Amino acid sequence: MRFIHLADLHIGKRVNEFSMIEDQRYVLKQVLQLADQQVADGKGLDGVLIAGDVYDKPIPAAEAVQLLDWFLTQLANRKLPVYMVSGNHDSGERLAFGAHLLRTSRVYVESVYDGTLHFVTLEDEYGKLHIYMLPFVKPVHVRRALFREAQTVNPALDAMSISATEDGGNEEEQNKDIIATYKDAVAAVLERTELQKNDRNILIAHQMVTGAKRCDSEEIFVGGLDNIDAELFDDFDYVALGHLHGPQKVGREEVRYAGTLLKYSFSECAHKKSVTILEMKEKGNISIETIPVKPLRDMRQIEGTYEQLMSRDFYKDSNTEDYLKVILKDEEEITDVLGKLRAIYPNIMKLQYDNARTRLMQHVEDVDWEEDKQPEAYFEEFFEVQNNQSMTKEQKKLVTDLIEKIWG
């Protein structure tokens, strides 16, 4: 069986106030073309795995909803099943709208963890294959789901006032002790799931796995509190991950982040965006391929003086419609430089100077200010940065005399 693995579509995203909706439609069309090509080449395709952050906001704009509707409809028209989970950017309840109806078109959506890790079973000449779908979970989500399950067994349990247990605690506090971290939460979900280990098993999940590389456009938890260990997934033949924007493996090849289809920050300029294709034959026989995608507009950085950037020789062989971070090397600030540059580069997202003044300001920000350090010492450091040499005795005396005269 062959699957396309996608993640972090972030439909409706705005980057530096630029709407990405046109770019997203452009690259989603490439995914559809790739799917058609796989079929035309006789390789076939058995479904699309979408590992969370389908939308960029919990309440997506109308144009974002329309684009997702169009994409899912196109996949359904191709008789391609879709297996989709929610991410931390999604509203699970909103993403689940129409989920039961969508199942009739084989679009399977898991958006809120309810105490069960749901799955769909497929079968081919190699036997059964189970696709498990785990939406993004926090410890509180799992505790809540387990408490509700406990209530069905013991209706006397109440969310507001839970009767004490024999050891003096209560059900809610016990769950907090057991499921305190993201690792605990995911471990609890998987421990409650009985895998058929002789069959092939795929997990779709949206979590942060320890050891993976982040970038600036991703949500970061202080101290890595959201980290989980890749070892939790050892019983799965393939883990289709979402959450991180750079395509990468974590540990073994079969635990993979698909990454975004587009660049969403300048920290991603070096990323090679792609679509991941997974092929599973008999158990243990897995092949993974990444196929590059080409954006409507790339995201990149250019630098030079104003005169250099405005020269036709500089930009004639590049796409001036790209999303740009511009670094100017001019020593003097240029009036209305952004407006002038946008006459050639209309999609400048960021503009900054890199010259002696900005480097000095950065040095000042980086100085480790000490309470017992005298002003003369700071001035000496400043002098060395400006002149690339130390002050003479005469210069030091002049500075000391001036400070005494001015400050008394």
Image: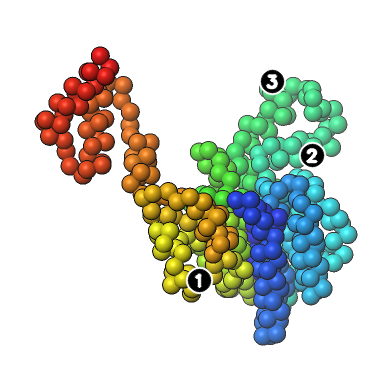
Q: Residue 15 in the image: state x and y as whole percent.
A: 61, 53
Badge 3 or badge 1: first in the primary sequence: 3
Q: Position of residue 192 (x, y in %)?
A: 70, 47
Q: Secondary structure at mark 1?
A: loop
Which residue: 68% across, 48% down? 89
Per the rendering, the mark at residue 348 is none
**Residue 32 placement: quadrant:** bottom right
Return the mark for residue 149: 2
Q: Nearer the viewer, residue 43 or 335?
A: 335
Q: Is residue 101 left or right of residue 299?
A: right
Q: Which residue is mark 1?
A: 318
How many circles with numbers are drawn on the protein? 3
Q: Can you tell which of label 1 and label 2 is closer to the viewer?
A: 1
Badge nearest the viewer, 3 or 2: 2
Please name the amino acid that badge 1 sits on.
Answer: Ser
Quarter in which the C terminus is drawn: top left
Q: Report, in whole angstroms, how far the alpha carbon at label 3 lies from the one at label 1.
A: 70 Å
Q: SS at mark 2? A: helix
Query: Would residue 229 be found to the left or right of residue 196 on screen?
Result: left
Q: What residue appears at the point 23 percent right and 28 percent down from the top-left corner?
A: 377
Residue on which the image places disc 3 = 168
Say left or right for 369 vs 384: right
- The mark nearer the N terminus, 1 or 2, is 2
Residue drawn at x 72%, y 22% as measured from the top left: 166
